[in-house]
Image (tube, grey):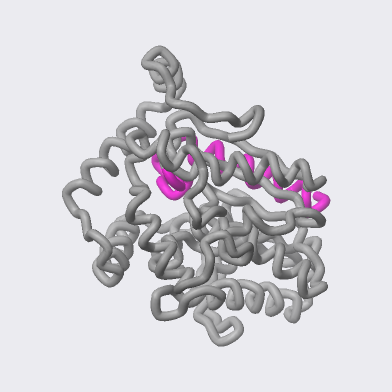
Amino acid sequence: MEGLFSIGKASSKDSGARKAMVSQRMQEFSERIRANRAANSNGNDVIASRASMEAEMAKLRQPADVQRESVTVAGRSARWFRSPDTQSDRAVLYLHGGAYVRGSIDTHAELMARLSQSIRSPVLGLDYRLAPEHPYPAALDDAVAGYRWLLETGLKPRRIVVGGDSAGGGLALATLQALKGADLPQPAGAFLFSPWTDLSGSGDSVTTRATADPMVDPASLAVMAAHYLDGMPPDTPGASPLFGNLSGLAPLLIQVGDAEVLLDDAARLHQRAQAAGVDASLRIFDGGFHVFQAVPAIPEAAEALADVAAFCRRVNGD
């Protein structure tokens, strides 16, 4: 890793210092996830992995006061999430995670509902096509079509924010690059949770955080990348937007945990985006595991969403 965000193996003293700054709930859920992963490994079975993710995320209690409306967006299933105090002149286009092979608007429904509450904006979740049935660039094509659809409803670009987690975070970044390439206006900004921006796995943290990460296994991640790439070079910018042209993109808010194999995907993006003149900010959460924002019981999740809300207010001009 370059410069400020150089990542090496922490000493036991450093590890203890970081642990002291981590909430008890973050530590508890990290251990829970680690144990669940060991007990319910699906190997590389995509169908079983999808079913497991759907079942696990269905356990989360949905906020009762958030309205949900199913719609069709550019031929894909989508869903609006609106908290009681949302402002109708804006929207968030949210792209779920799942390594491009799993995940849906159902697995991320609770997170999108909380985002709507925090941001006070309608959130549109999009069921983009998944690999291996629909490899790259299907997901990217669907995301761009979703953004075009929002523009066609009359929303102004300065009132649209794009967000996503993991693969959805990488997809959100790739969408901004594709919009620039198509001479379409950039949204007001984009927030990325633990974004997967480098499908080649070249970041140092893929190795240095492999033991620390309770959720993401580098070997399985490589298999999922191969499903999505379907023979394309892993550094193809549309799939690995870290290697694409970052100049001229909308402001970025990047959040990641320091216990993630994808830590370098976020840190390198931040550094390269700033070098390209992009308004980009990065927050690394002590002890954070992959997309901890999806666990409402963790105090750091509330902090993260509060940061997103402040970012959205700023880029929306509120």
On screen, residue 84 versus residue 315, left or right, reads left
Q: Can residue 316 be seen in this view?
A: yes
User: Which residue is most to the top?
Assistant: 13
Is 299 included in the stretch rendered in magenta? yes
Q: In which quarter of the image is the N terminus?
A: top right
Q: Where is residue 200 in the image (x, y as percent from the top left)?
A: 50, 55
- Determine the main secondary structure of the stretch shown in magenta: helix
**Picture coordinates of residue 270, whole percent (x, y):** 67, 42
Q: Does the magenta stretch include residue 171?
A: no
Please indicate whether residue 189 sits to the left or right of residue 23 in the image.
Answer: right
The residue at 44%/62% (across/down) is: 225
Q: Residue furthest bottom?
A: 75
Relative placement, left or right, of 221 versus 267 is left
Residue drawn at (36%, 27%), measured in percent from left and top?
Answer: 24
Residue at the spot 42% in from the left edge and 34% down from the top edge: 208
Please provide the residue range marked out in magenta: 290-318
**Compared with residue 318, is residue 139 higher up or lower down, i.e. above or below?**
below
Residue 226, position as x, y percentages in the image: 42, 66
Relative to the observer, which residue lies in front, 22 or 248?
A: 248
